[in-house]
Image: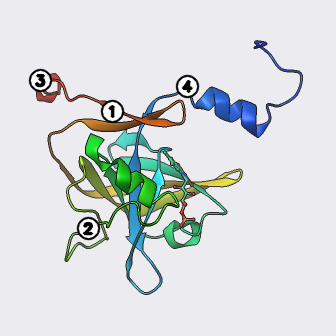
């Protein structure tokens, strides 16, 4: 592959390059217009700030979830290694599994993700054919377990280290 391009990369070439970036996998959950629980699989999740606590997701403008998420509370559910069916379920393959929802949560969220962050809307920014949504974290939880990953357009796993991470923090 050339190191520089005379023209901007096409979507296929850009995706091929981006697919080499390994990420975790989240399901972003939120309420639909009737208050019912909804979700969409997203790996464009990143931490932004600890003070105030801010995180970012990038939502396709054409996604049905776009308008339900913009300016609204949401929850980022980080998936564990065994939760690939949830990733498929919320990426347009309904029937992959039956999602279980936490009852009585302020913002809809899944039962037992590897980690979760409930967010209040903070800012929204133009991101071309996506909108960048920054949320202020209003609640968190996590458990032990291996992580679900996404690289090379495939799901994979990352094992939890035996000594955990608490000693690093
Ligand atoms: C691994 C993976 C990561 C994804 N990440 C994103 C993302 O960051 N942002 C996004 O808008 N869509 C992302 N998608 C696509 C959405 O999950 C998919 O379009 C979904 O059907 C959207 O549902 P909706 O149209 O009901 O909102 C991803 C899909 C997969 C499989």
Residue 23 lies in quadrant: top left
Q: Between marks 4 and 2, how big is the CA–CA gap?
A: 32 Å
Please give the name of the residue rendered at 26% of the width and 69% of the height, measured from the top-left corner: 101
Q: Position of residue 124 (x, y in %)?
A: 56, 58
Please give the name of the residue rendered at 29% of the width and 37% of the height, measured from the top-left corner: 147
Q: Between marks 4 and 1, how big is the CA–CA gap?
A: 15 Å
Asked whether the beta carbons under mark 2 and mark 1 sit within 8 Å of each other, the answer is no
Q: Which marked residue is nearer to the observer: mark 2 or mark 3? A: 2
Q: Earlier in the sequence, mark 4 or mark 1?
A: 4
Density class for disc 2 (Cα within 10 Å; few <14, some 14-19, many ≥20) is few
Secondary structure of residue under mark 3: loop
Q: Earlier in the sequence, mark 2 or mark 1?
A: 2
Give me the disc on residue 100.
2
Q: Earlier in the sequence, mark 4 or mark 3?
A: 4
Q: Which residue is mark 4?
A: 20
Q: Which residue is mark 1?
A: 157
Secondary structure of residue under mark 4: loop
Q: Earlier in the sequence, mark 1 or mark 3?
A: 1
Q: Between marks 4 and 3, how big is the CA–CA gap?
A: 27 Å
Asked whether the beta carbons under mark 4 and mark 1 sit within 8 Å of each other, the answer is no
Q: Which residue is mark 3?
A: 162
Please give the name of the residue rendered at 31% of the width and 47% of the height, measured from the top-left corner: 79
Q: Position of residue 142 (x, y in %)?
A: 18, 47
């Amino acid at each position: 592959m050339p190191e520089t391009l005379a023209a901007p990369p096409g979507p296929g070439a850009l995706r091929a390059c981006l697919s080499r970036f390994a990420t975790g996998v989240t399901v972003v959950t939120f309420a639909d217009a009737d208050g019912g629980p909804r979700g969409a699989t997203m790996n464009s999740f990143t931490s932004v700030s600890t003070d105030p606590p801010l995180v970012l997701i990038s939502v396709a403008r054409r996604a049905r979830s776009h308008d339900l998420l913009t300016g609204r509370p949401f929850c980022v559910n980080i998936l564990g290694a065994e939760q690939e069916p949830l990733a498929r379920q919320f990426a347009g393959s309904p029937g992959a599994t039956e999602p279980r929802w936490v009852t009585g949560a302020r913002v809809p969220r899944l039962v037992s993700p590897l980690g979760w962050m409930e967010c209040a809307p903070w800012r929204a920014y133009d991101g071309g054919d996506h909108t960048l949504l920054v949320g202020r974290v209003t609640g968190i939880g996590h458990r032990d377990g291996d992580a679900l990953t996404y690289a090379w357009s495939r799901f994979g796993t990352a094992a939890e280290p035996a000594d955990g991470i608490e000693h690093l923090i």
